[in-house]
Amino acid sequence: MEFLNILVAAVVGFAFGAIWYMALAKPWMKAAGVSESDMQNAGKTPYIISFVALLFVAGMMRHMFSLAGISGWEKGIVAGLGLGLFIAAPWIATNYAYSNRPRILTVIDCGYATGGCAIIGLVLTLF
């Protein structure tokens, strides 16, 4: 049951990312210096890596929630939001600051990490 919970959370997190980046595709591609042809030439590899990474994130979040006794969708959202906002986003922001990436790229990617963790936290606590 736990693996199914993690799998569903990863799928929902992936779907959130698809919606997030479709809505912000133009500013993201401009800030990242990526063209539409670059995206097409990348093939499926980035999507596969992204999904596998989300499985790891959801799995670790499930483990942490279990150890901390986090249950109930309200606590799941708050815990996920906290992980995204205070762990994932600062890490991304630090990497982008040192590589002199545009601020809008930092905002877009940190927003996805924060929202994605919140949604994964919600899904993990619904089962």
Image (cartoon, grey):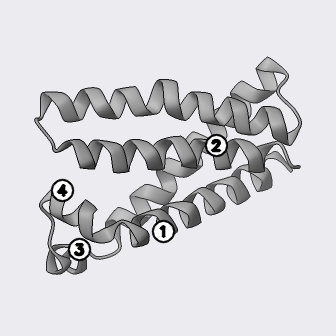
The label shown at residue 18 is 1
| Of the pair 90 and 5, the residue shown nearer to us | 90
Q: Position of residue 56 (x, y in %)?
A: 55, 43
Residue 60 in the image, given as x and y percentages of width and height: 63, 34
Sequence-wise first label, 1 or 2: 1
User: Viewer-nearest of labels 4 and 3?
Assistant: 4
Q: Residues within 10 Å of mark 2 (few under 14, many from 20)?
A: many
Identify residue for label 3. Answer: 39
Q: Secondary structure at mark 1?
A: helix
- Identity of the amino acid at label 1? Ala
Q: Nearer the viewer, residue 26 or 18?
A: 26
Q: Which numbered disc, 3 or 1, marks the residue that appears first in the sequence?
A: 1
Residue ID for mark 2: 118
Question: Measured from the top left, where is residue 82 in percent x and y?
Answer: 60, 28
Cα distance in 3D space between marks 3 and 1: 14 Å
Q: Which three-letter amino acid code belongs to the residue tagged 4?
A: Ala
CA gap, disc 4 to disc 3?
A: 11 Å
Q: Kindly state the secondary structure of the residue where label 4 is placed.
A: helix
Please tell me in which quadrant of the rendered image residue 64 appears: top right
Residue picked out by circle 4: 32
Going by the numbered disc 2, the residue's amino acid type is: Ala
Total numbered badges shown on the rendered structure: 4
Rendered residue at 61%/35% (across/down): 81
Tell me: residue 113, above or below residue 24.
above
